[in-house]
Amino acid sequence: MRAGVIRPALNSYLRPTRPVTWAAKAVHGISDAQLADAPRLIDLWPQVRRSLESRPVVAHGASTEKRFLRVFPLHGFGPWLDTLTLTRRVFPMLDSHALSDAIHSLGLSAEPELTTPGFRWHDAASDATASLVLIRHLIKSAGVEILNLPTHKK
């Protein structure tokens, strides 16, 4: 994996098919009004597909992201690298394996990608960036830095 700067390929809200729950509002700080003019996933699908096809997909608790992609059953993305599962295996001694807790416990909070203005936990783009920082650390910790993972094409 290249040790370059992590840049998001896509950062957009999505228009939901139902109102935002009170729990989602509390955790993510997103309101129905913010999503009213957002594109639907189907509208962004060509860009999502270009960004993810033929690449490993990294997520912390990948089952959540996989649920969103059920509407496209033949998407073919993968392999999936679940940083939650990997962190539990590589660092079983951590008190918590939640993404923010693992990042803090492993001393990764000061990584440049996590200190940028606008970074905020439970924001999809920020959590995706944190997952990439974590997988970079896991690969390094496992001693497989020579792993040649494909990089994002422009």
Image: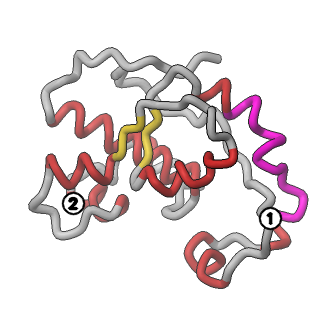
Residue 68 x, y percent position in the rendering: 62, 52
Identify the residue at the far front of this view: 73
Q: Identify which residue is drawn at 66% across, 84% down.
A: 22
Q: Which residue is tagged 2?
A: 105
Identify the residue at the far bottom of this view: 22
Q: Earlier in the sequence, mark 2 or mark 1?
A: 1
Left or right position of 69 against 17: left
Specify the label residue 17 is tagged with.
Answer: 1
Q: CB under 8 Å between callouts 2 and 1?
A: no
Of residues 90 and 33, the one drawn nearer to the viewer in this rendering? 90
Of residues 9 and 72, the one drawn nearer to the viewer in this rendering? 72
> What colour scheme has been applied to the protein in the rendered image?
secondary structure
Q: CA separation, marks 2 and 1? A: 37 Å
Q: Identify which residue is drawn at 44% across, 50% down.
A: 62
The part of the chain drawn in magenta is: 35-48
Residue 67 occupies quadrant: bottom right
> Which image quadrant: the C terminus?
top right
Q: Identify which residue is drawn at 62% across, 48% down.
A: 70
**Callout 1: 10 Å neighbours few (<14), some, many (20+)?**
few
Q: Is residue 128 a member of the stretch shown in magenta? A: no
Classify 46 as above or below 132: above
> Which image quadrant: the N terminus?
top left
Indicate the secondary structure of the residue bearing disc 2: helix
The mark closer to the camera, 2 or 1, is 1
Q: Is residue 38 a member of the stretch shown in magenta? A: yes
The amino acid on which the numbered mark 2 sits, given as a three-letter code, is Ser
The amino acid on which the numbered mark 1 sits, given as a three-letter code, is Thr
Of residues 85 and 114, the one drawn nearer to the viewer in this rendering? 85
Left or right position of 23 against 112: right
